[in-house]
Amino acid sequence: MRADYATLHKTIKALTEGETDEVALMATVACELHHSDDRFDWTGFYRVTAPEVLKIGPYQGLHGCLVIPFSRGVCGAAARTGEVQLVPNVDDFPGHIACASSTRSEIVLPVRNEDGQVIGVLDIDSNQLDAFTQEDAEQLTAILTEVFGGQGSVPQIGV
Ligand code: SME
């Protein structure tokens, strides 16, 4: 089963409409994404809870590491650079943090609030090699912008 992003986007939008609590939003997004696609073996968020520190947030899958500094791992790289990290083979990523030895590839996306600040990252891990595509990066970014970005992520004219 592959994610049907059009339906997924609509469902997540409907479920999260009017909610502003970040943990409630993250829990809902993690659940909906995780069960939509067989490639997704671990799906969850790390939140920025202190300067340069990521702490585990809502997730689905086996247990994840609790704390990741910005300086470490794929999650740290996404938080530090503000850019999507698409890793086809985790063995080729220096400093990859192996929470599960079964993970072969992963995608990590920064999560921004309406002011454009990185408030966390979305990490999806797969037991399949080279599981993720540019299409996944684009569709997941669109969902995150919809849920966490609010109006502030749309360029404002005249303000
Ligand atoms: N692989 C991630 C760590 C998080 S877990 O796999 C859940 C990383 O290198 O940042």
Image (cartoon, rainbow, N blue to C red):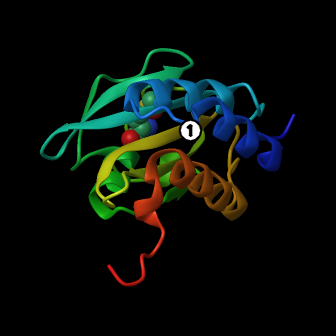
Secondary structure beneath disc 1? Answer: strand
Q: Nearer the viewer, residue 131 or 114?
A: 114
Residue at the image point whose x is 21% and y is 50% from the top: 71
Q: Residues within 10 Å of mark 1 (few under 14, many from 20)?
A: many
Residue at 34 percent across and 26 percent down: it is 56
Q: Is residue 116 above or below residue 17?
A: below
Q: Quadrant of residue 80?
A: bottom left
Residue lying at the far top of the rendered structure: 62
Q: Residue, x 44% and y 23% (percent of image)?
A: 58
In the displayed structure image, the side of residue 90 where residue 46 appears, left or right: left
Q: Quadrant of residue 137?
A: bottom right
Is residue 100 at all visible to an observer of this figure?
A: no
Q: Residue 147 appears at what percent x and percent y?
A: 53, 45
The three-letter code of the residue at mark 1 reads: Ile
Q: Which residue is mark 1?
A: 124
Q: Judge from the rendering whether residue 13 lies leftward or rightward of residue 23; answer left or right.
A: right
Report the quarter where the C terminus lies: bottom left
